Image (cartoon, rainbow, N blue to C red):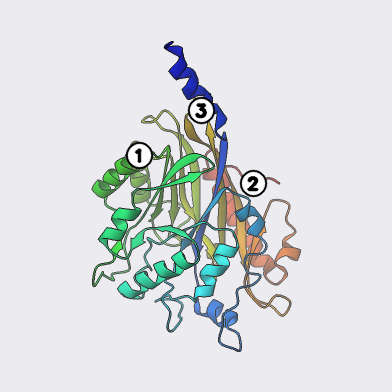
């Protein structure tokens, strides 16, 4: 056999695979008490129709879409802050909007203790969600991690960790993935050994309400980049924080660092917590068939509160050419203030992550 044949076969195989894949990420999906109350119908059911209609096309057009589910879905009595518990229909609405994966490692995952994690996972499974970050027991984690998803023929590995759970501790045998560098190293290696071409770490970190990353976030980002991670997607501060694309000296490819996407849906009311950013990322194969992160762009979103004309909360995209007075007529001044602050931070601190253009 000619020594060129194996090379040619590998090259043709690579070239026959799709050359691009897109993944969308959004920030914290929350349910405060007023959101729950507004969704409640006279028959006791919960209706989230219209909440995500304005962004569903953007989400569902991606090859894969990821949301941080920052509330248990535990059944029983529903509640907002400080001990969250959302109705099942909230998860169904997220799925209907086009999301494929729910991240569950965050500081509120234990708000309804071990049973809350079990019930949340059961609800996610029922709705056809992929999910990582919290598990019903050690055996379930061992079956789930490494998690490698085939996304348009790109083998993408996902991991998810949180800094803590608000002082709540596990009572029985559920598992939450906390930030632990040694465990993260092991998980990254196992994910790569399982065939992942791209490794994405979604991480709950930082200081709430701070528009710039804490030094601890920067240090951990450097650690993850040093482990060859391709994309780092941050949450928890409930406000946006900068985004950057770096050259990764370990892999020879590019790495994406997102410090915080802010809130996707919530009833938080301070200027910077009223919205967040959706992130669209593109994976490509180079001429040698090597998969890599290529580029990303962000799109601001704002949460429109209920009115007589739209009786539910709404997530509204705010692009550079959006008429804010029309998009959020009852909150136009507040929306402008949110957009001004977010734009100022991104324009000053983002590195190679531009605003989305239609």
Q: Kindly report the distance in space between the C-alpha atoms of the residues bearing marks 2 and 3.
A: 33 Å
Quadrant in which the N terminus is drawn: top left
| First in residue order: circle 3 vs circle 1 | 3
Q: Kindly report the distance in space between the C-alpha atoms of the residues bearing marks 2 and 1.
A: 31 Å
What's the residue at 57%, 35% (across, down)?
18
| First in residue order: circle 2 vs circle 1 | 1
Query: Marks 2 and 1: CB-CB under 8 Å?
Result: no
Q: Position of residue 302 (x, y in %)?
A: 61, 63
Residue 93 shows in this picture: yes
Q: Secondary structure at mark 3?
A: helix
Asked if 15 appears above or below 126 in the picture, the reply is above
Q: Of the numbered discs in the image, which one, if any, rests on residue 356?
A: 2
Q: Position of residue 247 (x, y in %)?
A: 44, 32
Q: Quadrant of residue 71?
A: bottom left
Closer-to-camera residue (276/28): 28
What's the residue at 35%, 76% (across, down)?
112
Is 318 placed left or right of 169 in the picture?
right
């Amino acid at each position: 056999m000619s020594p060129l044949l194996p090379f040619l076969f590998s090259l043709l195989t690579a070239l026959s695979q799709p050359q691009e894949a897109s993944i969308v990420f959004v920030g914290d999906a929350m349910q405060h008490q007023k959101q729950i109350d507004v969704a409640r119908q006279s028959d006791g059911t919960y209706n989230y129709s219209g909440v995500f209609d304005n962004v569903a096309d953007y989400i569902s057009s991606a090859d894969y879409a990821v949301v941080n589910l920052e509330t248990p879905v535990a059944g029983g009595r529903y509640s907002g802050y400080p001990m969250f518990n959302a109705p099942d229909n909230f998860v169904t609405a997220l799925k209907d909007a086009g999301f494929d994966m729910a991240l569950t490692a965050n500081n509120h995952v234990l708000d309804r203790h071990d049973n809350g994690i079990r019930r949340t996972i059961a609800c996610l499974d029922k709705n056809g969600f992929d999910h990582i970050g919290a598990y019903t027991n050690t055996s379930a984690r061992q079956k789930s991690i490494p998690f490698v998803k085939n996304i348009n023929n790109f083998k993408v590995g996902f991991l998810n960790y949180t800094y803590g759970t608000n002082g709540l501790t596990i009572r029985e045998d559920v598992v939450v993935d906390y930030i632990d560098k040694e465990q993260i190293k092991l998980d990254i290696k196992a994910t790569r050994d399982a065939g992942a071409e791209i490794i994405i770490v979604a991480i709950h970190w930082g200081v709430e309400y701070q528009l710039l990353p804490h030094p601890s976030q920067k240090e951990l980002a450097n650690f993850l980049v040093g482990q060859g991670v391709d994309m780092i997607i941050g949450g928890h501060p409930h406000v946006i924080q900068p985004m950057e694309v770096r050259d990764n000296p370990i892999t020879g490819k590019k790495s994406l660092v997102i410090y915080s996407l802010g809130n996707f849906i919530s009833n938080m009311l301070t200027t910077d917590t009223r919205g967040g950013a959706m992130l669209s990322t593109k994976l490509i194969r180079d001429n040698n068939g090597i998969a890599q992160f290529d580029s990303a762009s962000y799109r601001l979103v704002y949460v429109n509160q209920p009115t007589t004309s739209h009786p539910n909360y709404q997530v509204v995209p705010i692009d550079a050419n959006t008429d804010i007075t029309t998009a959020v007529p009852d909150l136009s001044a507040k929306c402008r203030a949110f957009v001004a602050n977010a734009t100022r931070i991104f324009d000053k601190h983002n590195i190679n992550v531009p605003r989305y253009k239609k």
